[in-house]
């Protein structure tokens, strides 16, 4: 009797074969800092002595947290908290890689709940999944809402977020946000911001701006992007690594167009490293922005990346870097280079 045929090895995962579906209750439950920031605290932030604004930002956030922790407990829309002193929100403005998300997550960790933490995309998608009124109801009993990577990429988001934050602030929810753009400059270079000036100014009036200056800590004293591997080396490493994914770069870009960015985190469920073949500069802005969103979710989860083709610091051509999303692209390059160093 012949021996049974051996089952072939499963091989690397393929992101392009995944079509995640994320239920609304998971969207709410996952409004917490990502795994990369589980252990961060104010004490673990290391201000650059050459940048006094960094230590000042820590002091401002500690004061904000202390005032919030000692304030009255809210009971949602129908019982307002006492009006907070000053503006109801704090807004960390600075370049990429200066530790703004570290500080925002530290604030979230020290403030007692109920509280929520999400990226701008996650918060807007929550409204899409639950509906506006249900989102207000779900968040209005919170003490604190933290929004990371605050961006206004289109007029619809401007009106939506302005109205949402206004309703939450009126209910007594304190707000904290990070961005690379000052509140009254949100939307510049992306749409006709002057047509939505009232909404943008309304957002700006709700935040006390705290500047965080400095250089990208991920690149301090470190070399440029590692040299890409060969296709053969990428395939070999993917085959040898448990939980690795392996995809051609152009196939992944095409697949990302079919998956809503709010599901990119779920796309990475169980993935311990990402391997990409044939990386090329991204010529299309829509594809580039989707890649930025995926890079953010990979960075949140500390997922190393191994690539062949073009170096990661050449992902976005000059014509894109000259546009209104320059800071987003530079942040994505910074994070992907850091993840490529993790891969060794």
Image (tube, helix red, strand yellow):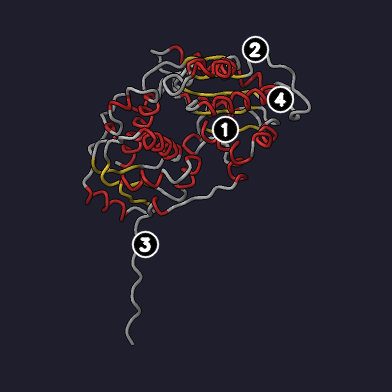
Residue assigned mark 3 = 10
**Mark number displayed over residue 86:** 2
> Mark 1 touching mark 3, by CB under 8 A?
no
Instruction: Give the residue drawn at x 36%, y 29%.
Output: 329
State the separation of the CA atoms marked 2 and 3. Answer: 58 Å
Q: In this view of the protein, can residue 63 be seen by the observer? A: no
| Label 3 neighbour load within 10 Å: few <14, some 14-19, many 20+ | few
Taking the image as shown, residue 326 lies to the left or right of residue 43, namely left
Residue assigned mark 1 = 117
Image quadrant in which you'd find residue 161: top right
Q: Is residue 44 above or below residue 291?
A: above
Q: Position of residue 190 (x, y in %)?
A: 43, 23
> Mark 2 touching mark 3, by CB under 8 A?
no
Element assignment for label 3: loop
Taking the image as shown, residue 50 lies to the left or right of residue 116, namely left
Instruction: Give the residue drawn at x 32%, y 27%.
Output: 320
Depth order, front residue of 40/230: 230
**Mark number displayed over residue 185:** none
State the separation of the CA atoms marked 1 and 2. Answer: 22 Å
Residue assigned mark 4 = 171
Element assignment for label 2: loop
Q: Where is residue 92 in the image (x, y as percent from the top left)?
A: 50, 19
Label located before the other in sequence (2 or 4): 2
């Amino acid at each position: 009797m012949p021996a049974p045929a051996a089952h072939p090895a499963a091989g690397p995962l393929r992101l392009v074969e995944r079509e995640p579906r994320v239920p609304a209750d998971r969207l709410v439950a996952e409004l917490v800092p990502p795994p990369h920031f589980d252990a961060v605290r104010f004490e673990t932030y290391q201000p650059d002595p050459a940048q006094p604004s960094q230590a000042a930002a820590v002091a401002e956030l500690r004061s904000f947290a202390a005032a919030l922790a000692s304030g009255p407990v809210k009971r949602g829309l129908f019982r307002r908290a006492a009006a907070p002193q000053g503006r109801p929100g704090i807004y960390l403005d600075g370049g990429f890689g200066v530790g703004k998300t570290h500080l925002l997550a530290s604030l979230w960790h020290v403030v007692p709940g109920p509280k929520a933490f999400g990226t701008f995309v996650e918060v807007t998608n929550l409204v899409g999944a639950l509906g506006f009124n249900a989102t207000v109801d779900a968040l209005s009993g919170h003490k604190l809402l933290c929004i990371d990577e605050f961006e206004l990429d289109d007029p619809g988001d401007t009106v939506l977020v302005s109205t949402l934050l206004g309703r939450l602030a009126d209910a007594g929810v304190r707000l904290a946000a990070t961005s690379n753009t000052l509140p009254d400059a949100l939307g510049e270079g992306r749409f006709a911001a002057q047509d939505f000036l009232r909404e943008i100014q309304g957002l700006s009036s709700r935040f006390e701006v705290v500047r965080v200056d400095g250089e990208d800590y991920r690149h301090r004293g470190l070399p440029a992007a590692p040299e890409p591997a060969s296709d053969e080396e990428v395939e070999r490493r993917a085959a040898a690594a448990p939980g690795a994914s392996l995809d051609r770069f152009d196939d992944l870009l095409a697949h990302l167009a079919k998956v809503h960015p709010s599901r990119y985190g779920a796309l990475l469920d169980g993935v311990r490293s990402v391997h990409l073949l044939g990386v090329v500069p991204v010529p299309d802005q829509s594809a580039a922005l989707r890649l930025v969103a995926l890079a953010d979710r990979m960075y949140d989860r500390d997922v190393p990346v191994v690539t062949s083709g073009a170096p990661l610091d050449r992902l976005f051509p000059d014509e894109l870097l000259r546009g209104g999303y320059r800071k987003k692209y530079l942040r994505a390059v910074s994070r992907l280079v850091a993840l490529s160093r993790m891969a060794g």
